[in-house]
Image (cartoon, rainbow, N blue to C red):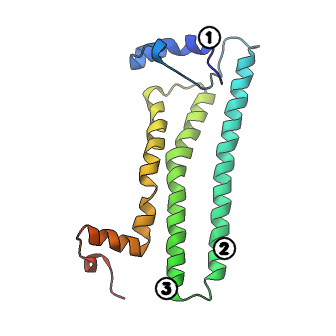
Amino acid sequence: MPPDDQIEFAIRDILKAELDWDFENIVYDGPYLHRSTETNQNHVLNIIGLFLMSIILLLSIILTTVCAIMCYVKINRYTTTQSRKSKSLQFQLFYALVTQTLIPLILMHLPATILFIFTIFDFNLGNYSALVSMTIAIFPALDPFPVMLIIKSYRLAILQMLAIPVWIVVRKN
């Protein structure tokens, strides 16, 4: 999906009108599917590139789902003979993993999929297309929070560091 003259012609005015950016200062990369000429080789390359990125995105989601299901089945199978404390820790780790899986799904996969769909149907998102970059940038900051909040010993350590009395948060067993 390399830059070419048709893409430049198509986005030069949009960048100036909507974002007030000079095209000479822009480096761009991406598909432009709706061209005026039918026999352009770059048009086919753009469609193939977008198709391959969509397949990679879909395979990532499928692989994550299959691994999560397999993990849940194995945890249920192997925790039947474990102590209550060990079983609790295993499920805390599992729920932390599920949450850590949902974060990239919501912050990276979903916005990218929406952007691909709008690109295929030639709908200009304008400034909203920058949301994909912002959500991807937020991901590394949010990724450790599920582990810190779901696993009991980490959560209690954080509460102690913040000087919040643990007896307020922890229910007596």
Left or right: residue 13 compared with residue 52: left
What's the residue type where badge 3 is placed?
A: Lys
Q: Which residue is mark 2?
A: 73
Is disc 3 surrounded by few (<14), some (14 to 19) or many (20+) residues within 10 Å? few
Query: N-terminal of the two: label 2 or label 3?
Result: 2
Who's the residue at 27% across and 68% down the image? Answer: 161
What's the residue type where badge 2 is placed?
A: Val
Left or right: residue 87 compared with residue 56: left
What's the residue type where badge 1 is placed?
A: Asp
Q: Quadrant of the C terminus?
A: bottom left
Q: Which residue is mark 1?
A: 5
Asked if the residues shown at circle 2 and circle 3 are in contact, with their CB atoms under 8 angstroms apart, the answer is: no
Q: Nearer the viewer, residue 127 or 100?
A: 100
Q: Which residue is mark 3?
A: 85
Asked if the residues shown at circle 1 and circle 2 are in contact, with their CB atoms under 8 angstroms apart, the answer is: no
Q: For the residue labelled by badge 2, is the local secondary structure a helix, a strand or a loop?
A: helix
